[in-house]
Amino acid sequence: MGGFLSDSYVWMRALHVMAVISWMAGLFYLPRLFVYQVERAGPGSETEETLQIMQRKLLRGIMYPAMIASWLFGLALVFTPGVVAWGMLWPWSKGAAVLAMSWFHFWLGARRKELLAGTNRLSGRQFRMMNEVPTLLMVIIVISVIVKF
């Protein structure tokens, strides 16, 4: 297995980066769609219906597949011999941030269900603030992987 992973390392890394970019795009955009729904779409309006369709397609068609691909290709990189120095801090800080990013993904899914059910309690301002979470996590991940402290 190590031979296959070592031989395909550059491909796994390229696929991982593409999946992460797709996932991050969704993590940035979905909360913005929530802001628009909360602030600009009346219950039962055509705008609300359009935003809900956009949210569903984004979450199910892009974000879930991209998250799964990010995890699969990321784990392939983790298990490639010689890639991760487990005695350093960076793989642990990256791992913690990736787990937090995954939690945020599922948190967004739960908020979407609340919006669909009409039980949302968050304001547009609160969704805007939560929209900063993936940015902070991205900073931790990129610094961890590039600086390797």
Image (tube, rainbow, N blue to C red):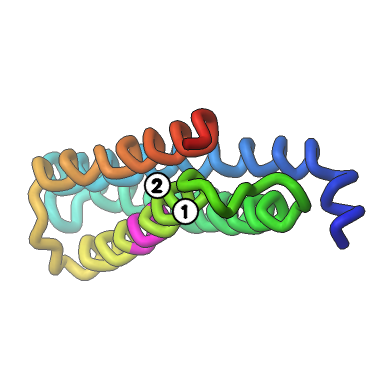
**Residue 27 rendering spot, x and y as whole percentages:** 39, 44
Q: Secondary structure at mark 1?
A: helix
**Residue 102 rendering spot, x and y as whole percentages:** 42, 58
Horizontal side, residue 8 vs residue 109: left or right: right
Segment colored magenta: 101-106
Horizontal side, residue 42 vs residue 57: left or right: left
Kind of residue at disc 2: Met
Q: Secondary structure at mark 2?
A: helix
In depth, the one of 6 and 114 nearer the eye is 6
The alpha-carbon separation of the residues under discs 1 and 2 comes to: 35 Å
In depth, the one of 110 and 142 nearer the eye is 142
Crowd class of label 2 (few under 14; some 14 to 19; many from 20; radius 10 Å): few
Q: Residue at x 85, y 44 (%)?
A: 8
From this view, report whether residue 22 is shown above or below residue 121: above
Q: Between label 1 and label 2, give the one nearer the viewer.
A: 1
Q: How many marks?
A: 2
Check residue 54 in the rendering and tell me which mark sits there, or answer none. 2
Query: Residue 137: within the magenta?
Result: no
Crowd class of label 1 (few under 14; some 14 to 19; many from 20; radius 10 Å): few
Mark 1 — residue? 92
Q: Using the rendered view, name the quadrant where residue 47 is placed.
A: top left
Q: Residue at x 77, y 52 (%)?
A: 81
Query: Residue 102: within the magenta?
Result: yes
From this view, report whether residue 37 is shown above or below residue 138: below
Q: Residue at x 8, y 49 (%)?
A: 123
Q: Earlier in the sequence, mark 1 or mark 2?
A: 2
